[in-house]
Image (tube, rainbow, N blue to C red):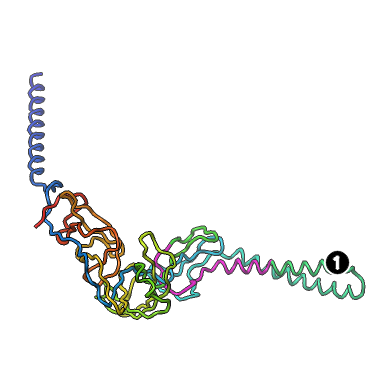
């Protein structure tokens, strides 16, 4: 009995030592872990928006490229998907076969319909002769003619269904998404692949009310692409909106032909340069202060010693500065340096 008690005490002692050691290691690990102090002030540089910045005669408007065509290619027929002839990234031409449905039953129905039509044509010929000899009534002969026409219509319907078992590309482009798998049962309207055409793209820009009348459909303009170090593309105005948004900006779309050696992808940023015989003076912020895209720009504004992420409506640009149409005032202090370390609501200190 005494031996059992001694063994138990020894085991308990080992457990106590082990737990104490683990807790000590955990405390040491916690001391080594860096925990960011959210209340610590981040050092930044601030400045007021430039109240009267002059944009010279070449105005630039920022926007995002959209594919000229992007659609889900859907099945017109119903049945089992037995073959997909493309994969994501495949380049296809207009009219190219993309996928096939099981059409064996329809093929058999078409053969049967053709045999039925052949039989009805023979019967119709015999009835025509009998009708001349007045061996059958006109009503019976007309019924036979209608039966033949009905069978021909049914054949056309089956041929239409057969055509629907072949999914063809409605335009040339690149397969950007596969939306069905082999063996799937599909119905009319079921998407098979997403097809995107970027041989031409539309650059959508937001133009202030004062400038929208400078854009005319078909007008030649120059477009530069940020991802290709500002390389220029010949382009033309595709459409202009007739309805302004809440900030009195108008949507203008610019049609751009792609280049093989400097390919534009949908979603990239671009700028439209428009020559004018007059300059514009307006409030502006430096582009280096921007957070996010130039289409929906934001800046950090100092409010009571904290950084407040603030959106504003952009106007024209000259590459270095972006016009402020609405959302900021000349008295706002905006962060122009150090914003990479900021989050909304953080404390800040200024140089």
Residues 184 and 248: in front is 248
Quadrant (top left/top right/bottom left/bottom right) for the C terminus: bottom left
51 relative position to 208: left or right: left
Q: Position of residue 92 (x, y in %)?
A: 44, 74
User: Which structural element holds mark 1?
Assistant: helix
Observer able to see residue 266: no
Residues 23 and 59: in front is 59
5 relative position to 241: left or right: left
Q: Quadrant of residue 108?
A: bottom right
User: In the displayed structure, would residue 331 be above or below residue 14?
Assistant: below
Which residue appears at 48% of the width and 75% of the height? 94
Residues 350 and 34: in front is 350
Quadrant (top left/top right/bottom left/bottom right) for the N terminus: top left
Q: Position of residue 350 (x, y in %)?
A: 11, 55
Residues 351 and 173: in front is 351
Q: Quadrant of residue 318?
A: bottom left
Q: Position of residue 233 (x, y in %)?
A: 32, 79
Q: What residue is pinned by disc 1? A: 140
Which residue appears at 42% of the width and 79% of the height? 218
The magenta-colored residue range is: 154-178
Which residue appears at 9% of the width and 26% of the height? 7
Observer able to see residue 347: yes
């Amino acid at each position: 009995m005494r031996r059992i008690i001694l063994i138990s005490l020894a085991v308990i002692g080992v457990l106590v030592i082990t737990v104490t050691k683990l807790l000590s290691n955990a405390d040491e690990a916690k001391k080594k872990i860096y925990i960011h102090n959210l209340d610590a002030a981040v050092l930044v540089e601030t400045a007021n928006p430039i109240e009267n910045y002059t944009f010279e005669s070449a105005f630039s408007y920022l926007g995002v490229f959209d594919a000229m065509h992007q659609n889900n290619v859907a099945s017109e027929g119903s049945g089992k998907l037995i073959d997909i002839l493309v994969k994501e990234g495949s380049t296809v031409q207009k009219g190219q076969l993309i996928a096939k449905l099981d059409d064996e039953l329809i093929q058999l129905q078409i053969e049967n319909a053709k045999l039925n039509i052949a039989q009805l044509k023979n019967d119709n010929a015999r009835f025509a002769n009998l009708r001349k000899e007045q061996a059958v009534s006109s009503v019976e002969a007309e019924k036979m003619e209608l039966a033949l026409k009905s069978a021909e219509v049914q054949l056309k319907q089956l041929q239409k269904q057969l055509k629907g078992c072949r999914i063809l590309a409605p335009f040339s482009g690149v397969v950007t998404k596969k939306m069905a798998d082999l063996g799937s049962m599909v119905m009319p309207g079921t998407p098979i692949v997403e097809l995107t055409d970027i041989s031409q793209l539309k650059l959508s820009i937001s133009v202030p009310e004062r400038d929208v009348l400078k854009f005319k459909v078909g007008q030649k303009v120059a477009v530069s692409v940020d991802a290709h170090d500002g390389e220029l593309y010949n382009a033309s105005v595709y459409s202009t909106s007739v309805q302004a948004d809440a900030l009195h900006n108008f949507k203008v779309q610019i049609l751009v032909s792609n280049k093989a050696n400097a390919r534009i992808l949908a979603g990239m940023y671009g700028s439209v340069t428009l020559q004018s015989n007059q300059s514009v003076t307006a409030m502006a912020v430096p582009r280096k202060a921007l957070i996010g895209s130039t289409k929906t720009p934001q800046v950090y504004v100092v409010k009571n010693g904290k950084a407040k992420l603030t959106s504003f409506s952009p106007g024209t640009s000259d590459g270095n500065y972006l016009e402020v149409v609405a959302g900021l005032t000349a008295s706002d202090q905006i962060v122009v340096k150090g914003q990479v370390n900021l989050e909304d609501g953080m404390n800040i200190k200024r140089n």
